[in-house]
Image (tube, rainbow, N blue to C red):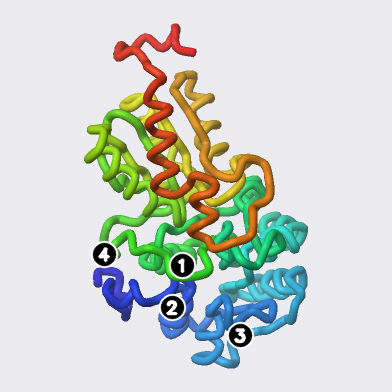
């Protein structure tokens, strides 16, 4: 593969996203002795233990103490190391937010946070293990880059980009076996640049993480059954967000739906809405995600269906929003 990964696209379909993260980190560790790993007693679940098995002298288990993990990571970064710190997304973001803010972001340190079990992907574990607010809190931190990859291949590319880019990163991945979105790693992944997954002129669906695959499937259904052409954007980087791609979608399609495994407050939908409002151009707009409430407990696929962030839910909302007509001229003054 173009990026030099040692597993193939076929093999990636048999690996969980976190397993690909673990393998990628091991490859990076072989080339760069300054890469170290930290875990809050979750090295097996987050797959950072793969790095520890390969480099036992370069992994540090601080126990169930995420605040201390970031303090140690900050110290290692000040000494010239590149720490990768892993925990479940909800713990990695909320439990130690003060340390992320002050120890990492305020000093703009080269620490990479990998939050696993993101969104409702650990659905059976309940609300204490659902990460539905991490985008909102992490996106507001100065100096922080926030990425939510669509699948395993994109996770590997995001980890490589983080290792090569100075400053704090937060990469949010899911618990288990995500759907395969990409069959190659040479599609042009770039931090801060959305990827057009499907061309369309009627409406744009902007998604991240597990919702990207669902948006692609919805676009196929809408084209086949309703002749609706849906542009699908994989907005893998929530900060810095790709303003150019968003504004192009507003101009070209006049209708935007955002889809995320997260509360609709403060996440992808909010980030896109900020860009749209600041542009001064109106469009039909809808945010799909958890509508300001905690998630039910259950299998991830059932929860995605419940909150209409699966393919069927996206189709339903596209058909609804298509009823909102906009003029084809370029006079925006009369649009509300």
Q: Secondary structure at mark 2?
A: helix
Foreground tag (4 vs 1): 4
Q: Earlier in the sequence, mark 3 or mark 2?
A: 2
Q: Which residue is mark 1?
A: 159
How far from the left and from the top, in percent, is residue 88? 63, 68
Q: Which residue is mark 2?
A: 28
Tell me which numbered mark, 4 or 2, is placed earlier along the sequence. 2
The one nearer the camera, 74 or 267, is: 267
- Neighbour tally class for label 3: few under 14, some 14-19, many 20 plus, Cα within 10 Å: many
Q: Is residue 199 left or right of residue 321?
A: left
Q: Residues within 10 Å of mark 1 (few under 14, many from 20)?
A: many
Secondary structure at numbered mark 4: loop
Taking the spot 46% from the left edge, 55% from the top edge, the residue there is 209
Labelled pair 4, 3 in contact (Cβ < 8 Å):
no
Regarding residue 110, the answer to whether it shows in the image is no
In the picture, residue 125 is in which quadrant? bottom right
As drawn, 133 above or below 104: above
In three-dimensional space, the C-alpha distance between marks 4 and 3, rounded to whole angstroms, equals 32 Å
Whole-angstrom CA distance, mark 4 to mark 1, is: 18 Å
Q: Nearer the viewer, residue 154 or 318?
A: 318
Residue at (31% x, 38% y) in the render? 231
Q: Position of residue 253 (x, y in %)?
A: 33, 27
Q: Residue tagged by mark 4?
A: 183
The reply, left or right, for residue 28 in relation to residue 201 is right
The answer to which quarter of the image holds residue 283 is top left
Tag 3's secondary structure?
strand
Name the mark nearer the viewer: 4 or 2.
Answer: 4
Q: Is residue 311 visible?
A: yes
**Residue 213 falls in image quadrant:** bottom left
Mark 4 and mark 1 lie on one chain; the one further toward the N terminus is 1
Q: Which mark is residue 193?
A: none
In the displayed structure, 46 sits above or below 273; it is below
């Amino acid at each position: 593969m173009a990026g030099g990964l040692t597993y193939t696209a076929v093999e990636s379909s048999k690996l969980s996203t976190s397993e690909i993260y673990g393998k990628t980190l091991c490859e990076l560790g072989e080339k760069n002795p300054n890469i170290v790993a930290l875990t809050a007693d979750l090295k097996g679940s987050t797959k950072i233990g793969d790095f520890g098995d390969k480099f036992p002298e370069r992994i540090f288990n601080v126990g169930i103490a995420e605040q201390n993990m970031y303090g140690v990571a900050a110290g290692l970064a000040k000494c010239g190391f590149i720490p990768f710190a892993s925990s479940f997304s909800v713990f990695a973001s909320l439990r130690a937010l003060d340390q992320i803010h002050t120890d990492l972001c305020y000093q703009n340190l080269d620490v990479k946070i990998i939050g696993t079990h993101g969104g409702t992907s650990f659905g059976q574990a309940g609300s204490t293990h659902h990460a539905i607010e991490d985008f909102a809190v992490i996106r507001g931190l100065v100096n922080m880059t926030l990425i939510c990859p669509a699948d395993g291949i994109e996770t590997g590319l995001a980890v490589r980009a983080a290792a090569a880019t100075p400053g704090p990163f937060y990469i949010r991945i899911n618990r288990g076996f995500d759907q395969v979105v990409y069959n190659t790693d040479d599609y042009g992944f770039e931090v801060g640049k959305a990827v057009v997954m499907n061309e369309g002129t009627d409406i744009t669906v902007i998604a991240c993480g597990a919702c990207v695959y669902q948006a692609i499937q919805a676009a196929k259904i809408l084209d086949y059954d309703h002749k609706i052409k849906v542009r699908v954007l994989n907005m893998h980087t929530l900060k810095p967000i790709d303003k150019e791609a968003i504004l192009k979608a507003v101009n070209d399609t006049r209708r935007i739906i955002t889809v995320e495994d997260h509360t609709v407050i403060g996440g992808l939908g909010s980030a896109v809405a900020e860009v749209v409002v600041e542009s001064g151009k109106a469009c039909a707009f809808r945010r799909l995600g958890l509508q300001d409430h905690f998630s039910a407990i259950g299998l991830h696929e059932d929860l995605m269906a419940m909150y209409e962030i699966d393919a069927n839910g996206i189709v339903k909302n596209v058909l609804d929003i298509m009823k909102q007509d906009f003029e084809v001229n370029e006079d925006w003054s009369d649009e509300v």
